[in-house]
Image (spheres, rainbow, N blue to C red):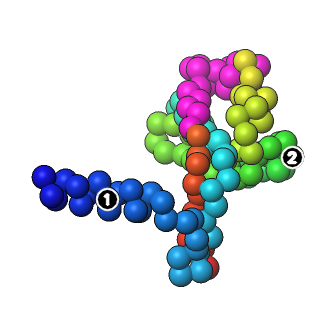
Amino acid sequence: MISRRLSIIAAATICSLPLTPALGRAVSSEKLVATIVIAKRPSNVPRDKIDQLIVASVPTYQKVPGLIRKFFTVNDDSYGGMYLWADRKAAEAWFTPEWAAQVKGRTGADPQVIYFDSPVQIDNQD
């Protein structure tokens, strides 16, 4: 019983710690939205072509309102990205039914978009 109380006290203490940078690393408690997108990779498109298409799409993503960061992702079966948005409204403005139809037209399958609240972000880059 005492160890359970100590665990609860320790957890409460940790949760109440201020979000300060540790060892010079940036920590933010800005309330952002993260999305993960997964789309079926077309089997008739080689990986080097997908990489070229990703690079060609960079200027488009640099202009998306509310998009803070995007990580392009590719594996043997799928492609997509991890996105960090200023808010959900900005994400929803990008991931429209028209956007989904374009992806489905390229891949033959509906893309999967998963929304997350991102209450804390860290940046470990020096």
Could you tell me residue 21's position as x and y percent?
58, 73
For numbered disc 1, what is the local secondary structure?
helix
Question: Which residue shows up at 86% across the image and 46% down it?
Answer: 63
Could you tell me residue 8's position as x and y percent?
29, 54
Q: Is residue 81 above or below residue 39?
A: below
Question: Which residue shows up at 57% across the image and 65% down it?
Answer: 19
Crowding at dot 2, Cα within 10 Å, few <14 / some 14-19 / many 20+, comes out as few
Q: Give whichever of discs 1 and 2 has the lower sequence position.
A: 1
Inspect this view and state whether residue 22 appears. Answer: yes
Q: Is residue 56 above or below residue 91?
A: below
Q: Which residue is mark 2?
A: 63
Q: Amino acid at mark 2?
A: Lys
For numbered disc 2, what is the local secondary structure?
loop
Q: Amino acid at mark 1?
A: Ile
Residue 81 falls left or right of residue 52: left
User: Magenta stretch?
Assistant: 98-116
The single residue placed furthest to the left in the displayed view is: 1
Inspect this view and state whether residue 42 appears. Answer: no
Tell me the quarter of the picture where residue 29 sits.
bottom right
Residue 42 falls left or right of residue 93: left
Q: Does the magenta run of residues contain 105?
A: yes
Could you tell me residue 48's position as x and y percent?
61, 50
Q: Does the magenta run of residues contain 28?
A: no
Choose between 3 and 50: the one closer to the eye.
3
Disc sitting over residue 87 in the figure: none
> Split into 4 quadrants, where in the image is the C terminus?
bottom right
Crowding at dot 1, Cα within 10 Å, few <14 / some 14-19 / many 20+, comes out as few
Choose between 16 and 22: the one closer to the eye.
16
Disc sitting over residue 9 in the figure: 1
> Label 1 to label 2, Cα distance in Å?
47 Å
